[in-house]
Image (spheres, helix red, strand yellow):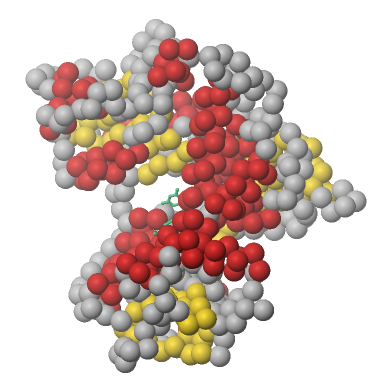
């Protein structure tokens, strides 16, 4: 059995880290790995409890400011849930969904194999992820240790003793400040049958799936994770039913864009039960899911399935901190913080998913950095607002700013530029199109995407943008910054498009740039 390791001073290559992480995950044994500088006698300015996006970025910044910082994490790697159970598997599954939609659209044509009536293995893709994820894990460890010089303890559950002290096995660590970066976990609904084999969430799917799901997947939830994973299950060739308590995909506020996204999912065979709720999960004699009962406005619907995916939200990992330190929580159990990331105890900070929504990487990382600055004597405030957002269906969907309806409430003279434009052929028009969309453009134009720019016609400022297709996500990160700084259609018109680019906003603006009273298009 492995025992505690002290690795400060040892050079770990990425390959060595990968072997180490794979071994530790496989054996499941928790023996602490100490990477602590024995030659630094300074007290820690902070312990980041949790080394995910929030903890790792915060600690790196604190060290960059000249402070001494320790990260403690129960996993044998840094980077947290993103590479292990969240963003990375989600992007893998969404890549598969996009690829499979293309292959199914062209099934038996050109060079594409015949995929009609063929199911693709979910288990094989999950196993591919499980063995491949140690690559990113190793990279995070290498970067943290060799490039950023961070001190950390890994592979060890931490216990909070008080607002300055953390215990790992028999060792105690003290710091001037404590930063809770403990993340969140999927909400588990309290319904009969929830413990049956065959009921998964985003964590257990990648950790525990050990059989090939049958031909029907039932997804509970209408949010990002539900839709993203649902589209993947659908693309593998399974009947997929999404059960949403209210509306599916409510986060995409622009009604017309949402309608396009839902229509395209339905055309891929996705089924939606809205205003519906999981009622009971029934099992067979072996304790495996057999049927699920869904409560709808028309009564109970029973669906035969051996595979249920539950994605009804995430809940902060706040229990231990709340109990031990008596911190104030909000009504959803997230740790309450002020804009400097301080909890109800001044030297205890909380960052990332543990402080509640939006549960996104940029917010976790920026909160981690904000806490670091305050701990090191700067005054720094942060509250996530006016950010761009994205999710996947079989497509990549990005949005920023206001929906058309929101813009019309706020501005008297709203102008719209969109592709396809309103026209007698509806969606059956081969625009927009761009990288990864050209085959659809030629063979099935209605699948070639949708995009919309929302403008305040009086100031000519962009107030909202949406893109459904592929390849625009990168641009939306920068576009949002410009929009927040008041970019106009005339500014966009002055930019240099890399034609053919997936979002046509620059050229659409240039076509109107000289026209003071331009029309919707
Ligand atoms: P985490 O990364 O969860 O880190 C918390 C850390 O605390 C973990 O490493 C854990 O091991 C450690 N820990 C907890 N308790 C203890 C303890 N007692 N002792 C020691 N260590 C402990 N966001 C995006 O921006 N893009 C995406 O594409 C995206 N996809 C997602 C897909 C899914 C399915 C999910 C669920 C989320 C997704 N997110 C995405 C959100 C993103 O993953 C989170 O916002 C982000 O990982 C939060 O980082 P964090 O540091 O707050 O928490
Ligand atoms: C990315 C993990 S997968 S982290 O945010 O760089 O730590």
Left/right placement of residue 388 relative to residue 440 reads left
The outermost residue toward the top is: 424
Q: Position of residue 324 (x, y in %)?
A: 52, 84
Above/below status of 75 relative to 419: below
- Which residue is drawn at the image coordinates 41% and 35% (left, top)? 397
User: Which one is in front, 297 or 344?
Assistant: 344
Residue 433 sits in quarter? top left
User: If the image is split into quadrants, where does the C terminus sit?
Assistant: top left
Q: Position of residue 425 (x, y in %)?
A: 41, 8
Residue 228 visible in rendering: no
User: If the image is split into quadrants, where does the N terminus sit?
Assistant: bottom right
- Which residue is drawn at the image coordinates 53% and 14% (left, top)? 110
- Which residue is drawn at the image coordinates 55% and 41% (left, top)? 93
Q: How many marks?
A: 0
The outermost residue toward the right is: 285
Left/right placement of residue 44 relative to residue 263 reads left
Residue 491 sits in quarter? top left
Q: Regarding ligand 2, which quadrant of the image does it lie in? A: bottom left
Q: Position of residue 359 (x, y in %)?
A: 44, 56
User: Which one is in front, 345 or 467?
Assistant: 467
- Which residue is drawn at the image coordinates 61% and 21% (left, top)? 113
Above/below status of 379 relative to 449: below
User: Which one is in front, 15 or 24?
Assistant: 15
Residue 461 visible in rendering: yes
Q: Position of residue 323 (x, y in %)?
A: 54, 81
Above/below status of 357 relative to 492: below
């Amino acid at each position: 059995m492995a025992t505690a390791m002290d690795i400060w001073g040892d050079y770990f290559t990425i390959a060595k880290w990968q072997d180490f992480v794979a071994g530790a995950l496989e054996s499941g044994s928790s023996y602490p790995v100490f990477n602590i500088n024995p030659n630094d006698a300074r007290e820690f300015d902070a312990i980041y409890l949790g080394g995910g996006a929030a903890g790792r970025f915060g600690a790196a910044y604190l060290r960059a400011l000249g402070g001494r910082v320790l990260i403690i994490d129960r996993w044998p790697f840094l980077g947290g849930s993103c590479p292990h159970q969240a963003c990375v598997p989600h992007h893998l599954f969404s890549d598969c969904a996009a690829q499979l939609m293309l292959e199914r659209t062209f099934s038996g044509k050109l060079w594409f194999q015949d995929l009609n009536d063929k199911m693709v293995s979910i288990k094989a893709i999950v196993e591919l992820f499980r063995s491949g994820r140690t690559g990113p894990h190793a990279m995070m460890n290498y970067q943290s240790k060799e490039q950023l010089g961070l001190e950390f303890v890994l592979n060890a559950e931490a216990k909070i003793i008080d607002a300055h002290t953390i215990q790992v096995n028999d060792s105690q660590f003290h710091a001037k400040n404590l930063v809770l970066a403990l993340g969140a976990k999927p909400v588990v609904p309290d319904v009969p049958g929830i413990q049956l084999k065959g009921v998964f969430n985003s964590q257990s799917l990648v950790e525990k799936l050990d059989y090939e799901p049958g031909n029907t997947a039932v997804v509970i939830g209408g949010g990002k994770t539900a839709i993203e994973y649902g589209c993947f299950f659908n693309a593998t060739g399974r009947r997929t039913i999404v059960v949403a308590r209210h509306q599916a995909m409510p986060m995409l506020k622009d009604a017309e864009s949402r309608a396009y996204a839902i229509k395209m999912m339905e055309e891929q065979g996705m089924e939606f039960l809205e205003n519906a709720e999981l009622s009971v999960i029934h099992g067979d004699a072996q304790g495996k899911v057999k049927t699920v009962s869904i409560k709808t406005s028309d009564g109970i619907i029973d669906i035969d399935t051996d595979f249920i995916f539950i994605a009804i939200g995430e809940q902060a990992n706040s229990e231990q901190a709340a109990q031990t330190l008596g911190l104030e929580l909000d009504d959803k159990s997230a740790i309450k913080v002020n804009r400097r990331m301080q909890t109800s105890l001044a030297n205890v900070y909380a960052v990332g998913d543990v402080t509640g929504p939006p549960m996104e990487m940029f917010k976790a990382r920026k909160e981690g950095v904000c806490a670091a600055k305050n701990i090191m004597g700067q005054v720094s405030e942060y509250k996530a607002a006016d950010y761009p957002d994205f999710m996947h269906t079989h497509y990549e969907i990005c949005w920023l700013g206001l929906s058309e309806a929101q813009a019309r409430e706020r501005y008297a003279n709203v102008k719209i530029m969109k592709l396809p434009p309103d026209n007698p052929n509806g969606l059956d028009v081969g625009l927009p199109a761009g990288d990864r969309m050209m085959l659809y453009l030629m063979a099935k134009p209605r699948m070639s995407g949708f995009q919309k720019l929302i403008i305040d016609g009086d100031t000519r400022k962009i107030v909202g943008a949406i893109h459904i297709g592929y390849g625009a996500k990168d641009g939306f990160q920068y576009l949002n910054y410009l929009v927040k700084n008041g970019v106009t259609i005339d500014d966009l018109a002055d930019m240099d498009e890399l034609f053919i680019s997936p979002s046509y906003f620059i050229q659409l603006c240039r076509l109107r740039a000289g026209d003071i009273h331009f029309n919707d298009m």
